[in-house]
Image: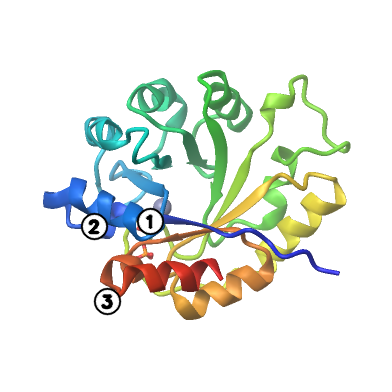
Amino acid sequence: MNKKKYITVGASILSADLLNLESEIRKLHKNGVDMIHFDVMDGVFVPNISYGMPVLEAINRIDTDELSMLLDVHLMITDPLKYISAFEKAGADRITFHLESESDTVETIKAIHSVGCLAGIAINPDTPAEAVFPYIHSTEFSYPYLNSFADIILVMTVQPGFGGQQFMDMSDKIRKIREYADKNSAHEVRIAVDGGIDDKTATIVKNAGADILISGSYLFNADDMKKAVRILEA
Ligand code: DX5
Ligand code: ZN
């Protein structure tokens, strides 16, 4: 029997009103979102440029005990390894980088864990599921340190670089990763999806086995954000 999965929703603030970021974040919290997805783009790995450490640091100042948010950093940059410590200092709780970047994957996972953050690996729509298998804990692949494995796999459901794009169905890929993780008793690995997630596409990705849903334009454009969050979580 399929166990009901606990779904976590993260809000991509790329779609927020950046002039009023503090009130936007308080609104997210009020409506039941406690994960802020922070998209970092360098104009090289992706064709767009967004924001970096100083903005995250400012968000981290809002993130108090009374308003506790998980700061989820998504690095769409060429050399993530170089910036791990800077993003941790700016307040990151989890750092996800791209397998397609130029940094060494195991070194980058280890660097993220060594600063006390959770580590995620993101893959673009053209990258196959099998590419992340070596970084999911299993008996087949043994690295000298357990901290060389990813805590989450982020499956991109759009080409990275912009919010508000059309969803690409990655169900087969999500299923393959979930099956591989379950077969290898890596049940704690979580699968996140990012790009074009709304009330309709959420059902598709949840059925395939995703349990972290990142959403930007759908959440911020919703007339009733609380309802939109509940729909994604359902
Ligand atoms: C795309 C970013 C996403 C994006 C999601 O490169 O990684 O996080 O902002 O936004 P929506 O939900 O609008 O596709
Ligand atoms: Zn993202």
Disc ID at residue 16: 2
Is disc 2's CB within 8 Å of ligand 1?
no
- Find residue 69 and report its horizontal and vertical position in percent: 40, 42
Residue shown at 33%/69% (left/top)? 225
Gap between marks 1 and 3 measured at Cα: 15 Å
Amino acid type at image mark 1: Ala
Image point (74%, 61%), residue name: 176
- The amino acid at mark 2 is Ala
Circle 3 sits in a helix, a strand or a loop, which is it?
A: loop
Estimate the x, y position of residue 115 in percent, counting from the top left: 50, 19
Q: Secondary structure at mark 1?
A: strand
Residue situated in front as seen by the camera: 203 or 119: 203
**Is disc 1 surrounded by few (<14), some (14 to 19) or many (20+) residues within 10 Å?**
many
Q: How many marks?
A: 3
Q: Secondary structure at mark 2?
A: loop
> Do the residues bearing badges 1 and 3 touch, measured as CB atoms within 8 Å?
no
Which residue is the extreme one toward the left? 19
What is the three-letter code of the residue carrying label 3?
A: Asp
- Tag 1–tag 2 contact (CB < 8 Å): yes
Q: Residues within 10 Å of mark 3 (few under 14, many from 20)?
A: few
Sooner in the amino-acid sequence: mark 1 or mark 3: 1
User: Badge 2: few (under 14), some or many (20 or more) residues near its Cα, within 10 Å?
Assistant: some
Name above or below for residue 199 compared with residue 54.
below
Nearest to the observer: residue 196 or residue 206: 206
Using the image, tell me which numbered label, if any, was put on residue 21. Answer: none
Query: Is 142 situated above or below 74?
Result: above
According to the picture, the residue beneath numbered tag 3 turns out to be 223
Placement of 198 over or under 69, stated as above or below: below
Residue under numbered circle 1: 11
